[in-house]
Image (cartoon, rainbow, N blue to C red):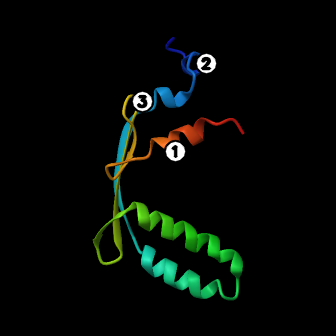
Amino acid sequence: PDSDPRQFIANSNSPLDYLKGELNGTIAGLDFLTTHVAKAAQQQPELMQLVLATSLLKGFGEATGKDQYAYSIKFRPEAGLLLNGRDMSLLKGALQQPR
């Protein structure tokens, strides 16, 4: 593609075709947050969305200590999306769907 970023994206079927990189990190406090928000959700049911989100986030992580979860995200056009070594390429397809 041309060196102009606008041409780079315009000449692609999807910008995701060129996205690549890695992100490694940890999140601490998800168990604590989930417990306290779940209690608060008894009075404010809309908080259950946060409980579901933190539960999903914990499920994708690898427990590395007390209330600490590690994440390794790798993306390559040819290999797809890996989250802690698990193939998550189906998410790439969802991102490319027109809305």
Q: Amino acid at mark 2?
A: Ala
The residue that appears at 49% across and 70% down in the rendered structure is: 55
Q: CA distance from mark 1 to mark 2?
A: 22 Å
Q: Are marks 3 and 1 in contact (CB under 8 Å)?
A: no
Q: Secondary structure at mark 3?
A: loop
Q: Nearer the viewer, residue 40 or 60?
A: 60
Q: Amino acid at mark 1?
A: Leu
The residue that appears at 57% across and 83% down in the rendered structure is: 38
Q: Secondary structure at mark 1?
A: helix
| Nearest-to-viewer mark from 2 and 3 | 3
Quadrant assignment, res 52: bottom right
**Residue 77, numbered label:** 3
What crowding class fits label 1: few (fewer than 14 Cα within 10 Å), some (14-19), or many (20 or more)? few
Residue 67 rendering spot, x and y as whole percentages: 35, 76
> Is the residue 63 above or below the residue 91 in the image?
below
Q: Earlier in the sequence, mark 1 or mark 2?
A: 2
Q: Secondary structure at mark 2?
A: helix
Q: Which residue is mark 1?
A: 91
| Nearest-to-viewer mark from 1 and 2 | 1
Q: Amino acid at mark 3?
A: Pro
The residue that appears at 51% across and 69% down in the rendered structure is: 54
> Is the residue 12 above or below the residue 88 in the image?
above
Q: Nearer the viewer, residue 86 or 19?
A: 86
> Is the residue 48 above or below the residue 16 in the image?
below
The residue that appears at 49% across and 12% down in the rendered structure is: 1
Q: Which residue is mark 2?
A: 10
Q: CA distance from mark 2 to mark 3?
A: 17 Å
Q: CA distance from mark 3 to mark 1?
A: 13 Å
**Residue 38, numbered label:** none
Residue 43 rendering spot, x and y as whole percentages: 70, 88
Residue 3 rendering spot, x and y as whole percentages: 49, 14
